[in-house]
Image (tube, rainbow, N blue to C red):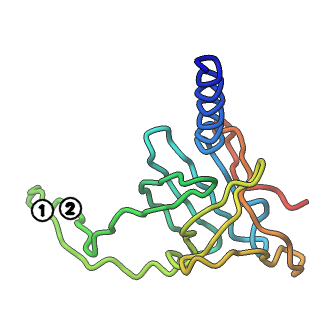
Amino acid sequence: MKKTVLVLISLFSCVAGKSQEVVSGCYASNFPIIGWFAAEITFNEDQSFEYLFAGDLYYDKIGGKYELIDNQIHLKYEEIRDTLEIPYTDSSGNLKSISLVKPVNNASGFRPSKLRIKKDKLIVFDQDGKRIRRKMNANERWQKYFFVKYSCEEDAWIPSEK
């Protein structure tokens, strides 16, 4: 009986460790959407993540916390301040600051709400919880869309069109 319990505990530990191993690291969209837009997400071991969506005139970089439930990663983005403090030096050399309202971030609508782990890829869900199956590629053809893992040490995270 003791051996059976030990085997079950060992098996559970291996499975739980494997799930966490799959999550931590860097992931990027498998191709640039319409040839311009790409996304990257980096999962840290402390349950935090950084998300980057960029291309053309869009740029959205934000962090947050993630929760791993079964084979799904639920993303909770940090709150964004609605004002921006800009420090400057006036003509007398005094340090001052001005408070401005931040412009609307149109790219924030492209943030995923959750991701499902499927083998070596992450399946993407939009903010309404609907699965994103395909996006248009540079050749104006619909292609399967997901995130793939890559080495965080690489310089260029944007995947090339294949």
**Frontmost residue, 75 versus 13:** 13
Residue at the spot x=45%, y=61% of the render?
Answer: 62
**Frontmost residue, 84 versus 108:** 108
Q: Do the residues labelled 1 and 2 touch (CB within 8 Å)?
A: yes
Q: In this view, does 158 lie to the left or right of 21?
A: right
Q: Tag 2 or tag 1, which sits nearer the N-term? A: 2
Task: Name the residue that disc number 2 marks.
Answer: 88
On the image, the x and y values in percent for residue 106 come to: 50, 81
Q: In this view, does 104 lie to the left or right of 54?
A: left
On the image, the x and y values in percent for residue 135 come to: 77, 76
On the image, the x and y values in percent for residue 78 come to: 36, 62
Instruction: Tell me the number on the disc at residue 39.
Output: none
Q: Is residue 39 left or right of residue 146?
A: left
C-alpha separation, residue under disc 1 versus residue under disc 2: 5 Å
Residue at the spot x=24%, y=65% of the render?
Answer: 86
On the image, the x and y values in percent for residue 47 come to: 45, 45
**Element marked by disc 2:** strand
Residue type at mark 1: give it.
Lys
Taking the view exactly as shown, the residue that stands out farthest to the top is 3
Crowd class of label 2 (few under 14; some 14 to 19; many from 20; radius 10 Å): few
**Frontmost residue, 98 versus 157:** 157
Crowd class of label 1 (few under 14; some 14 to 19; many from 20; radius 10 Å): few
How many numbered dots are placed on residues in this image? 2
Residue at the spot x=75%, y=72% of the render?
Answer: 33
Residue at the spot x=70%, y=57% of the render?
Answer: 122
Which quadrant: the N terminus?
top right
Residue type at mark 2: give it.
Tyr
Task: Name the residue that disc number 1 marks.
Answer: 96
